[in-house]
Image (cartoon, rainbow, N blue to C red):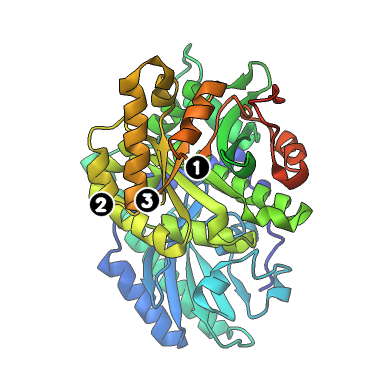
Amino acid sequence: MQPAELDTGRCDRQHEDARLAALVSTGILDTPPEPSYDAITRLAAEYFRANSASIGFADESRVWIKSHWGPHIREVPRKNSIFDLVLANDGPVIASEFSELSLSEEKLPIFSLLGAGFFASVPVRSFDGKILGTLSIFAREARLGLAPDELHMLESLANMAASQLELRRLRKSLTGNGSPRLHDAGASAIWPSSNDLRRALDQHQFVLYYQPEVELSTRKIVGLEALIRWAHPERGLVPPLDFIPLAEESGLILPIGDWGLEEACKQIQSWCLEDSRHASLRVGVNLSARQFSREGLADHVRALLLQFGLSSRQLGLEMTESSLTPNIRTAMEVLGSLRRLGVSLLLDDFGTGYSSLNHLHSFPFDVLKIDRSFVVRMTEGDQPLQIVRTIIELARVLGLDVVAEGIETREQYRLLRQLGCRFGQGYLFARPMSAEAVTQLLRLPGRVLPDPEACDILRV
């Protein structure tokens, strides 16, 4: 069966909300793989002599792989995924060549992740017909397709998975655990509501601003930090502190965070296409504690790097100490898998937590970012200056780079250079700015900013 054109927009918001509500009602996203699903993927792989088989369920922005046979991929971005192909087709999708899908390998990165040349995928539906996930088989060797009886067998296995899913939903409803979080209960006078956030996500109201990170000795732009803003049509540019706490509470931080990761990767690609020398830039993206609770985060990041043709060194992931502490074991596993992938790991707001030294010994960070609260007090006395000096020396001993945040005055700039701090960012150099404004800044000769000691620099 030929797949329909890939377009997630054709599924209107009402239908998608109903699909997500049905998915949440099963509780499947918060569980480890279960033997019943593992038996199904094993049977599928063995029957079709496939190299890999998987069952995955898709929420707003990613496909969670809940059972696998063969190479293990824990999650992939939903956009351009096999799930979206099946959803758009409202039925099975079978392909042995990318030309059949009008998609490149980069647009369907799971092919490279699994080394596959053929796949077949059928929907796993809820009891009332909503497509919640897929059962897929992958083979390295291309083949012509599936015979009718083979397709029937694959669909029968998917129906077995659907039956297990329905049993899970019924057990969950009997115990009364949890309820869908897709809508606020009733109208609320408090702004924003979770409905407002979901609408902003659907209508593409979120934007990324970027603040340059410079090498202090040369003033060359060596990286950027991506910072989310909400471009509200009536309220203007809304800062993150006004909506991120609600996004965390409601769970919407996951699709919003996934959007931010993809948008940053897309922008890195755009800058590199304009000038290949920009490939040396590293763009840092802030991750929340909820994002670090996902053991498949590295798989997700790897798929995005492949999709946009980026090297791992071009992406930095920034996290605070507080985002690591809810589940230390999971954080260790996630950071380890990201380190093996090759992306930079930055510990943000260093010095504000309670166990910074312990975290430095436990977690594989590359960069420390000195919290701006220490930088702004450097000129107020010996003690604040000594704190910054100690952090820089500690990083040197541990072989870590240091970025000083919140540099606002020439005196702070001078002191940081004297202390041997290599990198910094702050209003002295540039405020967070739009991607278009950054593009103009990157066109400066050698990406070198004017000397703030000699003149006032342009601040966007």
Q: Residues within 10 Å of mark 3 (few under 14, many from 20)?
A: many
Q: Residues within 10 Å of mark 2 (few under 14, many from 20)?
A: few
Circle 1 residue: 422
Left or right of 260, for residue 169: left
Q: Kindly identify the amino acid type of the residue bearing the numbered disc 2.
A: Ser
Residue at 32%, 71% in the rendered image? 38
Per the model, the C-alpha gap separating discs 2 and 3 is 9 Å
Circle 3 residue: 365
Q: Kindly identify the amino acid type of the residue bearing the numbered disc 3.
A: Phe
Residue at 41%, 79% in the rendered image? 44
Residue at 57%, 40% in the rendered image? 217
Helix, strand, or loop for circle 1? loop
Q: Are marks 2 and 1 in contact (CB under 8 Å)?
A: no
Residue at 72%, 51% in the rendered image? 270
Q: Kindly identify the amino acid type of the residue bearing the numbered disc 1.
A: Arg
- Does 177 appear above or below 294? above
State which quarter of the image contains the C terminus: top right
